[in-house]
């Protein structure tokens, strides 16, 4: 049995863990499953918006997280602070894992 120091994560909650489909669906739509009926799958669309101007909205900040709106199936991805793929991936994983505080109606 491994003893964890204070403020450390257990091994099964590694920061770079790949999110599962149910995790992503729960974060984006509020439901952890995909549609079963083919007609519902064909109608289901997720809109992605890229926010290039977050510094104009909120000057002097250092990080933005993706924002989801489950009612409209829209995801807004910030781009100003994400210089490479690794920073984008970490940012998205954090938003999915702790997404309850990044969503809006």
Image (cartoon, grey):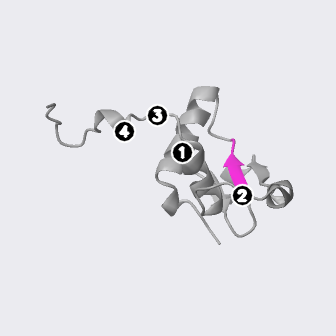
Q: Indicate left or right for 24 with 50 as reference.
A: left
Which residue does the numbered mark 2 point to in the structure image? 35
The image position of residue 105, as x and y in percent, is 65, 72
Above/below status of 94 relative to 2: below
State the SS at label 4.
helix
Dot 4 and dot 3 residues touching (CB under 8 Å): yes
The image position of residue 61, as x and y in percent, is 55, 50
- Ranked by sequence position, the earlier of labels 2 and 1 is 2
Residue 8 visible to the viewer: yes
The residues tagged by marks 2 and 3 sit, at their Cα atoms, a distance apart of 25 Å
User: At x 13% / y 34%, what residue is drawn?
Assistant: 3
- Ranked by sequence position, the earlier of labels 1 and 3 is 3
Assess whether residue 97 is covered by the magenta stretch.
Answer: no
Callout 1 environment at 10 Å: few (<14), some (14 to 19), or many (20+)? Answer: few
The residues tagged by marks 1 and 3 sit, at their Cα atoms, a distance apart of 23 Å
State the SS at label 2.
loop
Dot 4 and dot 1 residues touching (CB under 8 Å): no
């Amino acid at each position: 049995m491994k003893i964890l120091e204070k403020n450390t994560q257990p091994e099964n909650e590694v920061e770079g863990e790949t999110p599962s489909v149910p995790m992503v669906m729960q974060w984006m739509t509020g439901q952890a499953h995909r549609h079963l009926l083919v007609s519902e799958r064909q109608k289901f669309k997720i809109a992605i918006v890229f926010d290039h101007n977050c510094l104009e909205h909120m000057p002097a900040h250092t990080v933005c997280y993706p924002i989801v709106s489950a009612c409209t199936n829209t995801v807004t991805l910030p781009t100003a602070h994400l210089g490479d793929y690794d920073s984008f991936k970490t940012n998205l994983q954090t938003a999915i894992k702790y997404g309850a505080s990044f969503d809006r109606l």
